[in-house]
Image (cartoon, rainbow, N blue to C red):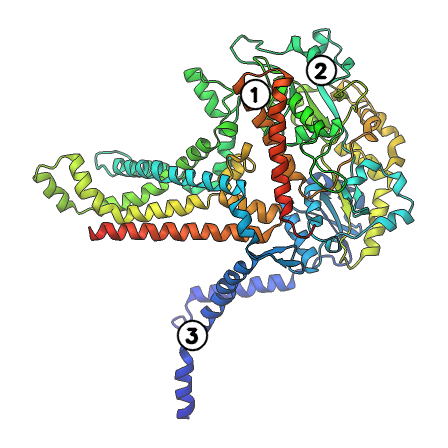
Amino acid sequence: MSFFSNRSVQVAPYLFLAPFASVFLVFMVYPLFQSVILAMEQTFGPEHTQFVGFANLRYVFGDPFFYTALRNTFIFAAASVLLQMPLSLALAMLLNQPWLKGRWLLRLIFFSPALVGAVFVGVMFSIIFERRTGLLNVVLHRLFGFSLDFPWLQEYAMPAMIIASLWMWTGFNMLYFLAALQNVDKELMEAAHMDGAGPWDRFLNVTLPAIRPIGGFVVLLSLIGAFQVFELPFLLFDGPGVDNRGLTIVMYLYQSGFQLGDLGYASTIGWILAIILIALSWLQRRLSRNESYS
Amino acid sequence: MFERYPLGLLVILMVAVASAAFVALRPSADSDKLVFWTFTQDHQDIFREIYGPEGIVDVQLLDMQAFERRMLSGFFTGTPVADIIMVERSVASQAWRGPTEAIGFLDLTDRLEAEGLLDRINAPSQRPWTVDGRIYGLPFDVHPVMLAYRADIYDAAGIDIAQAETWDEFMEMSRPLIGDLTGNGSVDRFALEVSQMDGLSIVMLMQQAGADLFDEADQPTLNAELNVEVLTRTAQWFSGDEPVAADIPLFTGAGERLRGEGLVLAWMCPDWRARRNILYIEGLHGKLRLMPLPAWEKGGRRTSVWGGTMLGLPKNGERTEEAWEQILHLYTSPELGRTKWEKLYILSPFKDFWDDPVFDQPDPYYQNQPIGRLYLELADSVPERTPSVYFPFAAQQLADALHRTVRRMRQSGFTEYADIEPLARRELDRVQANVENLMSRNVFQ
């Protein structure tokens, strides 16, 4: 009896862990391992595979489309951080002012674009940016005599993508900053005020350090989101756009894997994207750690 | 009782049991019917009409993406797909990316020969479904291309544009009607729609000239001399202060509105697009006419081809003989041939139907032209196309080549053929290299 009860005590933790462990192994570890193998293969279904070693990887580094996708994605990610973050913060600070009437309504309005999803935004902006008939050109034409034929989707694909993304995500990021701003120590702020610090000094020396952890998190979140962007350009341009100006890494992965059927190459691209994201996360952590030490 | 089993838990349990029972007891799909996959509502509607609710075929509509995934998954793993597959060219060609023995469609060559059907099918329409000399599908359409033009505007100006035999003549005759008509500083009317975002326009023009994107051995020929000439001349249409061609979206509401408002005088119009005009540009009723495409040179081909669909059978199908009988019956049924034209404006490639008087009926939308007959007169001269899986990629590359040539031409202020030709050649060399590079990655071919 004691043998069995001792035995069950020994086995019990493993039994409790087993459901998670089996799901984790089957749906996470195995596919991860399999995707490394896939990155070294050419496939046509599971029955026709050929091991090609590092040929896919070598091809990536000489592939002009990959570099185009990489460049576009980096530009989009940089714009996401450099334009979205200040705008979100400014908006959050404005909507955090007690004197502002109807703040709850404005918060809802600014946040609402994030609720509709990238597919809706992509379709809507593809109509807004149309030449001759699009809302943007028509309004600019009526107000400033701007050319109705301005080719947003053809020649200015990246600005079009960035504008659509700003509309969608600025309000979403604003919410994080708003939460952070509401947690800034009021006593510290009053003390700074009493010490004669002006609004800019208070912002730089009290507000900014207080919201920095959230800021770092939002930057990381935006970067990861920007590197994974797919639906927005795919729907805006109905593909990679003229001259691949809307081609992003994930769209190139999709094209390679699912339109051309080259899953091995798509897996290689996927791993490169994963490595970039891991590196960015590490860098962000490293920077925030240095900041907290300083 | 309620302490041990709270009400919420009981409700959840009851819902779970009820939904499980619903799923388990739901009547199963009609297993004695043959399953037929198609990808457009129009096709589903006409097949359902032909078979009726009690028919032996269950016609199912699948979204194109889902169609592709399910078809390829079935082919790759041997799991069941539909008994009959009606598939568009870009999706079907995915099946020929791998080794020939792995093609998931049934080889129909011997069956077609045995039935004596080969000579009765329009030969160029058969080519996109023929891989290494073997036929994997029955062409569902011909899709010859004509030119739809604003007869009301040309007639009012006293111009008989149908007399234009070449593209040069067409542009020259249209010139008095185009340009900045309102004096607002921008061109309000162009002669022809040519898309730079979608490769289909330039591909159609190249195929009309007699070049294709791939040769018989499936090697890319994008930078062939003929293609250089077509790209140069097409880019030239966009040159100068008053270009004759406009880049208008092909399949968006905005594009249809611009066509309806008269931004362009003409556009290339395969049979299926003749119906699209009727559906989406109602305002042009009685104002459009169709004419054969102007040729690149006098005496040249007056048509091209746009789109393509086939009927095929899966190699691993469990009811192959029944399915074959059905598609034979469908294919040779005059009812389908007639319905396809009446409802979808799609010409059948089965030549036995071509004498049907349905094609001679005047169409009031097109000023009572017998447009079925007009399309049929061009049917056997549609260009042949190879079945390459790389066609969509190559077509998109050609759109980029056109766009870049036009941009560089405008930046340099070039308007002459001799100046534009080197730009076009450079672009075609670039896209040729891109396609070759991509194809070099495929170890199965």
Q: Nearer the viewer, residue A267 or A206?
A: A267
Q: Which is more foreground, mark 3 or mark 1?
A: 1
Which residue is the site of mark 2? B168
Q: Nearer the viewer, residue B415 or B190?
A: B415
The lab-note entry on whether marks 2 and 3 share a chain reads no
* SS for callout 3: helix
Q: Chain of mark 2?
A: B
* SS for callout 1: helix
Which residue is the site of mark 1? B409
Q: Nearer the viewer, residue B419 or A274?
A: B419
**Residue type of the residue flagged with mark 1:** Met
How far apart are the alpha carbons under marks 2 and 1?
A: 19 Å
Taking the image as shown, residue A21 lies to the left or right of residue A108, namely right
Q: Chain of mark 3?
A: A
Looking at the rendered image, the quarter that the N terminus of chain A falls into is bottom left
Residue at the extreme bottom: A1
Graded by Cα atoms within 10 Å as few (under 14), some (14 to 19) or many (20 or more), the crowding at tag 1 reads many
Of callouts 2 and 1, the N-terminal one: 2
Q: Residue B170 location in percent, x, y?
A: 72, 15
* SS for callout 2: helix
Q: Which is more foreground, mark 2 or mark 1?
A: 1
